[in-house]
Image (cartoon, rainbow, N blue to C red):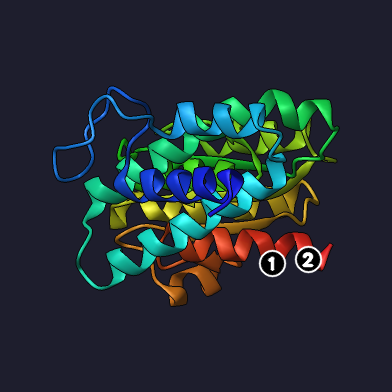
Amino acid sequence: MKISEEILTKIKENVVKGRRNKEDEDLEGGSVGEPGVEELVDGALKGEIGPKKIIECINDAMVVVGKKFETGEYFVPDMLASAEAVSVGMEVLEPELLKVGQKKEKFVVATVEGDIHDIGKNIFAMMLKGAGFAVIDMGTDVSAEKIVKTVKAEDGEIVGIGLSALLTTTMENMGVVTEKLREEGMSKSVLVGGAAVSKEFADKIGAIYCADAFEGVDKAKELIKRG
């Protein structure tokens, strides 16, 4: 195996294991002291492996994580660990992406007003970064007014908006966001997800339903293809 292939394989393995750096354990409690995603991505760049190849490798790793989650082998904490490893890798890649002038499509993500749950939103945000998006993470309990104001300020750069809600009482605020966007004449695509959210609800408010973060990233990529 070539050195370049070997290091890409290790990056993929460590994303799947949820290891951000050499201080992290893998999901089975081992591997401490061995290079994690942070060190491996840095080593790959120093070995003149291009950012594009590294991002493709990271995306492949998250496909594996998604399959493990679907089959019940992985649970939410495992998926979150992998997403955090992706986020660390993207931080190392950021300066290189800026050097080559690679355009990064922007996505706004938020948990809607009244809701403080952030695990789903965090996983989606980190996976978007791994897919090469620039993410404006507004946090939790964010009002429709703040979301619309942010989107308006970045209007020419925003590809889409990702909204999360865990509760039936707070998911109605997703509809407030889509309504305010329409009032402002902004035809931005809104992806919605969360335990309480359904496709029927998404259709009702004029949004795109995502069953999980993996589907959300796939649909975010589709938005770019549509232009």
* Residue at position x 56%, y 26% in the image: 42
The quarter of the picture where residue 153 lies is top right
Please, is residue 141 above or below residue 53 in the view? above
**CB under 8 Å between callouts 2 and 1?**
yes
Please, is residue 32 above or below residue 167 in the view? above
**120 with respect to 91 (left or right):** left
Please, is residue 166 above or below residue 116 in the view? below
Q: Quadrant of the C terminus?
A: bottom right
Please, is residue 157 above or below residue 163 in the view? above
Look at label 1 and name its amino acid: Glu
| Residue 97 visible at all | yes
How dense is the environment of label 1, judged by Cα within 10 Å: few (below 14), some, or many (20 and up)?
few
In the image, farthest residue toward the left: 29
Q: Which residue is mark 1?
A: 222
Q: Which residue is mark 2?
A: 225
- Residue 137 is marked as none
Look at label 2 and name its amino acid: Lys
**81 with respect to 127 (left or right):** left
